[in-house]
Amino acid sequence: MAFKRKEAVVEAVDLNTITPEDAEKRIIAGVKKYATNEANWTKADGNTPYLGHIVGMGIESANLADITMSIERQFLTRKTTRVPVQGSETEFTLVDGELGKLRILEGQDSVMATPGLTIKKLMELGHMRADAAYLEGVASFATIVSVGAGHRLNDALRKTLARLEKLAPAERAEAKANLQSLVQQTQDYEALLADAAALAASKQGDFQTDKASFDSLDAELRLINEKLKGVTATDDPSRAASLRAEEAQVRTRIRMMRQKLVVSEETARGAERRTKVDEAKFQETRAVLAESVKAGQQAMRAATPVAC
Amino acid sequence: MRLQRCLANAAAPFVHLFLWAAGEKRLGYAFKDVDAFRRQVWALLDSHDGPFIWAANHLTLWDSFLIYYAIFPFSKSLRWNRIPWSTPEYTNYYKLGNWLQCRLIRAFMYLCRCIPFLRGGDDEGSVRWREKAFEKCIWLLETGGTVFVFPEATRARNGWFEAHRPKDFLGRLALRVPDVKFLCLYMRGETQVGTTAYPAAGETFRIYAELWDPAIGPESTPRSVAEELFRRVGELQERWFASSSMAKNCSGNDVVDLASPLAREHFSPDLAEADPEWAERLLTAKEAAYLGSRPPREVYRTFWRFHAAKEAASKALAQAGVKVLPGGFSTIEVELFQGKARHLPSQLELCLSFTDDDGDKLHCVAVLRGGAVGDGQTPGDVLWRVEAVPPGRSPSDFARELCLELIAGSSDDIPSPASLSFTEIDDIPRVVRQGKPQDWGVSISHSGRFAACSFMVT
């Protein structure tokens, strides 16, 4: 069966024969048709998020798999030979082999939030040579996540402000309380972005939550193993088979949870270290937030009747 | 039973010390306001001379130990008639570890007043086992004792006590022992999202209790007793969540524009077949097999039903603090026929409902906790709206406005959408009213020509 994406003629190139900058351009061009925010896509660089309408390219979550497949279609790699991961029957990794199509394995695209982070991951996985100079210009995953949240919060505040101007005086009292709450939230978030240690601590909290879930799953696996021991001792083959199926299921769940843990660990770690490009992103976002807070405070003053 | 009771009475102080050492000292478990709680519960227990049934929600395998420990200070460990007998699942506890471990655990369970229960199996042996355990419970209650039963009979897969799904077991027990009173309980760790084998180390628990006299009369039935009991435990759950930092209402929605060119991109021109390489990234093996079994004319719609369900489920999960990684849709498995979605790593189970399902679009609502999604017979606790985005409007802005209008229009207390605003907390959209973010399980979505929103009214 001919699928439309196969009609598209894409000349794949060996990732080791092009510069990271060229790869970045190809990645951005490849996702054009999924980008719903044309303006942001047109000026996109290595640090423009794929998702999100405010500062991102506006790609919808329904098209996330398309981004990964678009990247795979465009590049060739030598990491093409599958090798099973020790101790697992379902997982495998890729090692050097014949030049062939790039394959991004399950979970590897979780932190590929921007073209720059995609290239960084491809370098980490050995598909491309590491290029320290290029990586200096790539904002971390933690930065993209924190900055993105800041822009969404700013958008919410700006929209509330815009609505306030159109309201009848009677409606303003409740709207003012909401505005006050949003201004406070934005101000708090701006302060959080300014304090790298506090931001890192909050991300560390998310990591600890994921770690607790992972440990709990691990405990579940140990419990099943204890049950299996007990069943083996009493020789109940049907119960043993059902427990083995349960064990396999828990192992799959652990694998999925591990992927999530890797992402939250990366976010927590990245929040602690800020490169120049990260710092610039934070400064830019803080300036935007501070301006909106100022506008919000002015609007609140204007909405407060002055006593004569 | 008499011998077990004698030995368990003698062992009670030692069991208490063991639970203190294992729970408080080794695992760092703590109970919030435990002294006040114990005073309140003992006032209730001392108000009735007859038998008691403890009925509590169930999330971890250690719940009965933890609840016993929360209620019993050491000084009460000789109040034998008030120490509850439990009915643990035989397969969970009685065949654990090697020969020696297995016997040690069995001995411990024996001294902890356990009556092993076999919940699975419809064969004669299993049914007889259940009836025998039931009769043992009756005997204990008739002799003034206390029995502890989880009314749901299993751990809640969505982490939510379903008050509208009563089970009759406790109703049957109450009818056989008319002077019995219920101690309704709701206990949960502050970070306990769903079902786990054990609570996380260092967990702090909050617990609520209420005494209920079922006042058995000639018109009482097992179902009527069970319904009231479930309602009461459900109310305690509401109280628990009212003081929790976790959101109670967790729901999500997703709309798909079926005519969108991007939605059709990975299908054959007649939409009868999906690109397998693409589908493999989004579906589990089970879902892919189901898709493959559908008649060609239903493949396209079935695929997008899976996708909408996963997207809606991921939004509901995020509200509960369980974030699904971008592109991690293969970690959610959908059962379209049963209207369920399961997050595989956490095993949290969500209920699904497809609304506005026509040739142009489909819309899905998912509920994890806080209420019911509803079905053809009974209305649920989720309200939603799907509308076409007017030309020139930003779909995202339009979806937000639609949501505020829907919420304001659904309540006499909210004068207009102007009294509401949107914000985002931990990447989750929340509606603010009177300056406070509301626990309404709000969700917004847009796709192609359509925008949609939903929220919960519980």
Image (tube, coloured by chain):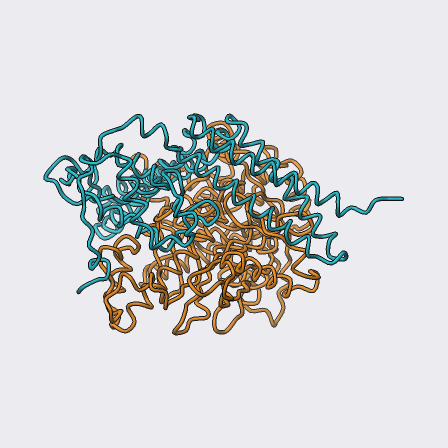
Q: What's the residue at 57%, 36% (across, down)?
A: A189
- Position in image of residue A151 (x %, y %): 52, 42
Rendered colour, chain B: orange
Is residue A140 toward the left or the right of residue B173 in the image?
left
Query: Residue B382 occupies which quadrant of the picture?
Result: bottom right
- Position in image of residue B452 (x %, y %): 50, 62
Q: Quadrant of the C terminus of chain A?
A: top right
The correct choice, above or below, for B113 with respect to B152 in the image is above
The reply to whether residue A28 is visible in this rendering is yes
Q: What's the residue at 70%, 57% (across, down)?
A: A167
Rendered colour, chain A: cyan
Q: What's the residue at 17%, 45% (across, down)?
A: A101
- Position in image of residue A74 (x %, y %): 22, 46
- Pick whichever, A192 or A73, lies toward us: A73
The reply to whether residue B173 is visible in this rendering is no
The correct choice, above or below, for B396 with respect to A199 in the image is below
Q: Quadrant of the N terminus of chain A?
A: bottom left
- Position in image of residue B237 (x %, y %): 58, 51
- Pick whichever, B32 or A178, lies toward us: A178
The correct choice, above or below, for A74 with respect to B366 in the image is above
Is residue B31 toward the left or the right of residue B414 in the image?
left
